[in-house]
Image (cartoon, grey):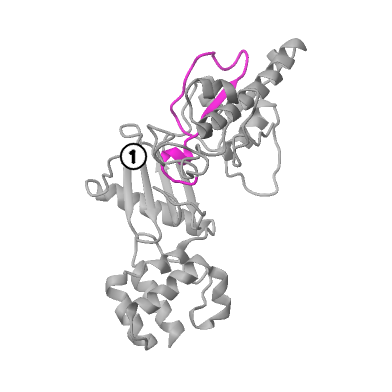
Amino acid sequence: MSHYAIHIPIDKDMRFYPKYLKKGLTEKEAAYASLIEGMDKSLGDLMDWLDKNDEADNTIIIFMSDNGGLASEPAWRDGELHTQNYPLNSGKGSLYEGGIREPMIVKWPGVVSPGTRCDKYLMIEDFYPTILEMAGVQNYRTVQPLDGTRFMPLLKGTGDPSKGRAIVWNFPNIWGNNGPGINLNCSIRKDEWKLVYYYETGKKELFNIPEDIGEKHDVAAQHPDIVKRLSKELGTYLRNVGGQGLKSRLYQLEIEEQEKKIAQIKGVQSANEWGSQIRSYVMHPYSLVKDVRTGYETSQVQSVLDGDLDEFIFAYLKSQIQ
């Protein structure tokens, strides 16, 4: 069952909206809360039907959200922006925990012990192989390699498939909203460590998630060895799967040092003139088609995230504008 709520536009559910106004919520937050209760009512109706038709013990229920709660749009939410998922940092669209950590509940009579909790991690891609195993499907073939890992051991308490496993997010795009951890970045989580890399600036942040779930303390400077190791693993993974995004690093170019050199080659009066053009191309990549002097292909701008990326991009741009 794929619920549209909770999503913008926040069209309040009048069955519950007045109740939240009476509780003292603002109109926006009352509307948001009414959608949450409306979804909860829908799920409850489905579960009631299973009980009435004696199917509850023969049904596995998996509940999960697709992303963190909206926290970047004042038109739909009240309060200080990027705090609505506290103690998690930021919200939907962010690679901080507020954007990628979602609630998940599994009800499986006779297998999953009621009231138990699990603090290990998995991804939505893991649902496919796990559901096949739940259904007893064996020796199946797929048209493409499986990206997911079965999480049955987490449900049964027999093992931890997240141990030593790296999971990756990549968002080399402009979503439309801005905020902490939003737009032009990628991330890797492995065991307790999480690295966030920003294509625009080349900045790398490192967090120990079990100790700092709110990601308040960037410890990259204290653990350069971990940063290097995770950067290498992230870059290798993105190249191996043909991930997009490295071209967004054109935006950075180490503006202070490289832009003057590029301006001299281009023959413009101001370094910022060329920098503005680069930014325009990053924001509107299709415009590159109109200017072959700075044309590029993702396959051409492939370089390691922890290597000489700035020098690579500078040399590439130089070859294009001569």
Examine the rendering and report whether any part of residue 237 can be seen: yes
Residue at screen point 49% across, 53% down: 171
Q: Magenta stretch containing residue 112, yes or no? A: yes
Question: Is the C terminus in the top left, top right, bottom left or bottom right quadrant?
Answer: bottom left
- The residue positioned 45% from the left and 64% from the top of the image is 248
Residue appearing at x 71%, y 31% in the figure: 137
Q: Which residues are magenta?
A: 93-121
Q: Amino acid at mark 1?
A: Glu
Between 318 and 179, the residue placed more toward the observer is 179
| Residue 148, image quadrant | top right
Element assignment for label 1: loop
Q: Position of 129 compared to 233: left or right?
A: right
Q: Which residue is mark 1?
A: 215
The answer to whether 133 is drawn above or below residue 57 in the figure is below
- 155 or 280, which is in the foreground? 280
Can the viewer see residue 165? Answer: no
